[in-house]
Amino acid sequence: MFVKQIANWGEFMRKKIAITGGIGSGKSLAAKYVADMGYPVFSCDEINRELWQNSAYIEKIKALFPACVSNGKVDKNVLKSIVFNDETALKKLNETAHPMIMERLYSKMNNCESALIFAEVPLLFEEKYEDDFDVIIIITRALDKRIQAVQQRDGFSIEEVLKRISAQFDYSTLENRIKNLTAYVIKNDGDEMNLKEKIIAVVSNLK
């Protein structure tokens, strides 16, 4: 009985923490800094890449978007060109992909032995997963800096970046969305070292 109580205390003390933010905000860099501190950090993007190797998942994509699949492989560029120009298509893709991604994410987090367990979740608010986490770390950044970052990373035009931003959660409404949550909002308004210091301060507070 005593051993069981100890185990329950350990479970009670574990915190599942989501790191999120809009495209180009710097959330992946923030997640890297957390990992550099020695904490487990899981990534929805990495899980998504794992699914591209899953035949059952590919069949689901083929059923939705036949033109995107050839010889058992998904042409991601074709898929992106479809979903980012058609809100209905994007909704169908998200409804298929996100439950599978989150199921795998929760499994990985539940099997992780750590007091603090982090996950980078890009579409946390869009898909209403915020209540599944004990704490949320939100990275915000000025629009022009986000556009510049995505252009440098992906080679997109300004119009392409703005199209992707418009398909995501409107962070100008963030205050209302997080008023009942345990959340830390980090402004990525300096250099990389400045962001790192802010991340370290938040994680230290969580300990």
Image (cartoon, rainbow, N blue to C red):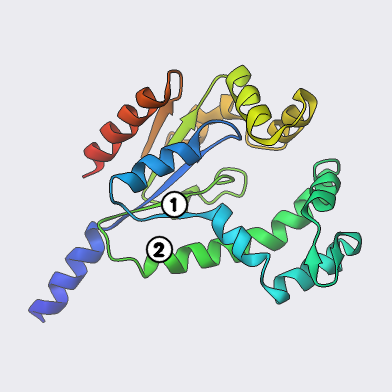
Residue type for callout 1? Ala
- Kindly give the residue lying farthest to the left in the view shown: 2
- Residue that numbered label 2 is attached to: 109
Marks 2,1: beta carbons within 8 A:
yes
Q: Is residue 69 visible?
A: yes
- Alpha carbon separation for disc pair 2 and 1: 8 Å
- Image height of 77 relative to 12, above or below: above
Q: Residues within 10 Å of mark 2 (few under 14, many from 20)?
A: some
- Residue that numbered label 1 is attached to: 119
- Image height of 111 relative to 29, above or below: below
Q: Residue at x 52, y 30 (%)?
A: 174
Q: Is 169 placed left or right of 201 in the picture?
A: right
- Image height of 107 relative to 16, above or below: below
**Mark 1 element type:** strand
Residue 10, quarter of picture? bottom left
Q: Residue at x 65, y 24 (%)?
A: 147
Q: Residue at x 77, y 27 (%)?
A: 157
Residue 149, image x, y percentages: 60, 27
Q: Earlier in the sequence, mark 2 or mark 1?
A: 2
Q: What is the quadrant of the N terminus in the image?
A: bottom left
Q: What is the quadrant of the C terminus in the image?
A: top left
Numbered circles on residues, count: 2
Q: Is residue 181 visible?
A: no
Residue 40, image x, y percentages: 35, 56
**Mark 2 element type:** helix
Residue type for callout 2? Met
Nearest the eye: 78 or 107: 78
